Image: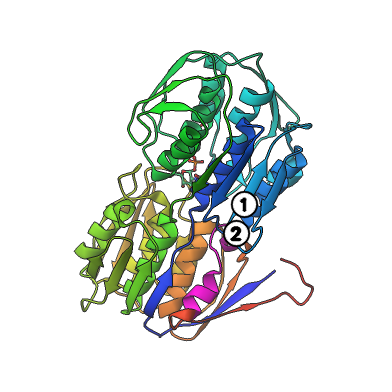
Amino acid sequence: MDKFVIRGGNPLLGTIKVSGAKNSALPCMAAAILTEDEVILENIPQVNDIETERKLLTSMGAEVELGYGRAQHRTRIKCAILSDPVAKYEIVKTMRASSLVLGPLIARTGIARVAMPGGCAIGGRPIDLHINGLEAMGATITQDHGYLEARADRLKGAHIVFDKITVTGTEDLLMAATLAEGESIFENCAREPEVTDLAALLIAMGAKIEGAGTGTIRIQGVSKLHGARHRINPDRIEAGTFLIAGAITGGDLNVDCCEPKHLGALITKLEQCGVKIDVGTDHVRVRSGGELKAADITTEEYPGFPTDMQAQYMALATQAEGTSTVIENIFENRYMHVQELIRMGANITISGRTATVRGKTPLQSAAVMCSDLRASASLVLAALVADGETILDRIYHLDRGYEHFEEKLRGVGAQIRRMGDVFGRK
Ligand code: UD1
């Protein structure tokens, strides 16, 4: 298994570029299932989850060309025939987002067989809201041997109020409703930019959707969708991770090719921590404003503070003067980075969903282990300010969602290198 070797101490200086959003690209690739025409997606990040989705679509009979021509970040998907509408466990076991193919598959083919998802080990992560919604739209769903099987002649529009806000649940049902008969009204929807991004693609494919990005989405089902070309939004979580990298190292970092509008909650918090921020149209510059100050966060659905930034923020909080309280509202069991941060010298206690970080504590290098995607990013950030050389194991978690992470960080002065496994295991 690959590892990172990171020597801390360098302030990050210069410009770092943000890639396309993995969490937009995944539903947009799934949306290609809805049409037999070609869908072209630009600004696709080169990360392992995207490769998994390519394999998944290909295994169903789709033609998927990733990075064709001179455009490394473009993908062309054509689902002319979906001979095998099955999301096999061997392919999707590492990726929870596999449930995103459920809605489009059943809408297009009338049958979907999808392995129950794996993915990050951050709590139970049920998919009951996807299932309830599809049932409300007329699907019959059964479960056997770790697979869900959904069948319907043609889905029917439905009025659904989500019990809880779910990002991929909103996306899955939105895709299903585009080809359903009649109107669907969804309430208590996720308002994340990734939902809006997906809706923009679906509209370009001929779907009739109003209200994406708000709590209520209306969809008028159509009988057919056509091909389209769409550019994926910048990754707000990658951008946020870089902003914290600049702040924690006391650097001067220009985070380029991002969408500052999607970073509001994090920028506000960094300013409270005493970090200097300049916001441009497509970039954010982060600079040291002297000593970091403690500030509390509570994770919430967008536009609140993202749960996907909680672990990285906690690394920053270890370097802030005072006590920061972190409340994780979205997922239980999302504090797996904490034990590793403590091993590096952090002072953190956990009680239920609340973590209390007492700073500032100097961090020391150690051999540490990644447990999930964002926890890995948190440990890299901690290592960037640790005294000595940190060895970060199981970075395959990080490779699921960050494109050329170490190369980008090296480009702005970090001392980070990848060490391959002597046996060639990933
Ligand atoms: C998506 C993101 C993930 C992010 C999360 C929350 C993708 C591919 N992943 O995950 O990076 O951390 O949003 O912003 O976009 N829930 C249920 N039943 C369901 C579905 C969800 O109870 O059927 C619960 C979950 O357990 C969780 C909460 O709803 O407590 C939010 O989960 P959800 O928004 O669905 O997360 P994902 O879409 O899986």
Q: Do the residues labelled 1 and 2 touch (CB within 8 Å)?
A: no
| Horizontal arrangement in the rendering, residue 4 relative to residue 52 (left or right) | left
Query: Along the horizontal axis of the image, is 50 left or right of 366?
Result: right
Residue located 58% across and 46% down the image: 40
Report the front residue among 5 and 88.
88
Image coordinates for residue 373, horizontal then vertical, percent? 53, 57
Q: Position of residue 114 (x, y in %)?
A: 69, 33
Q: Give the range drawn in magenta.
A: 398-410
Q: Name the N-terminal-most of marks 1 and 2.
A: 2
Residue 407 is covered by the magenta coloring: yes
Q: Which residue has dot 2 on it?
A: 47
Residue located beneath label 1 in the image: 75
Residue 144 point in image, percent of width and height:
74, 26
Q: Distance between the residues labelled 1 and 2?
A: 13 Å
Query: Which part of the image, by quadrant, shows the C terminus?
Result: bottom right
Quadrant assignment for the N terminus = bottom right
Q: Position of residue 100 (x, y in %)?
A: 58, 36
Please state which of the two labelled residues, at mark 1 or mark 2, is closer to the viewer.
Answer: 1
Q: In this view, does 260 lie above or below 300?
A: below
Answer with the quarter of the image where residue 359 lies. bottom left
Residue type marked 2: Val
Magenta stretch, main secondary structure, is helix
Crowding at dot 1, Cα within 10 Å, few <14 / some 14-19 / many 20+, comes out as: many
The quadrant holding residue 310 is bottom left
Q: Which amino acid does label 1 sit on?
A: Thr
Secondary element at image label 2: loop
Query: Observer-nearest residue: 177 or 347?
Result: 177
Vertical placement of residue 119 versus 380, above or below: above
Label 1: element kind: strand
Q: Is residue 342 visible?
A: no
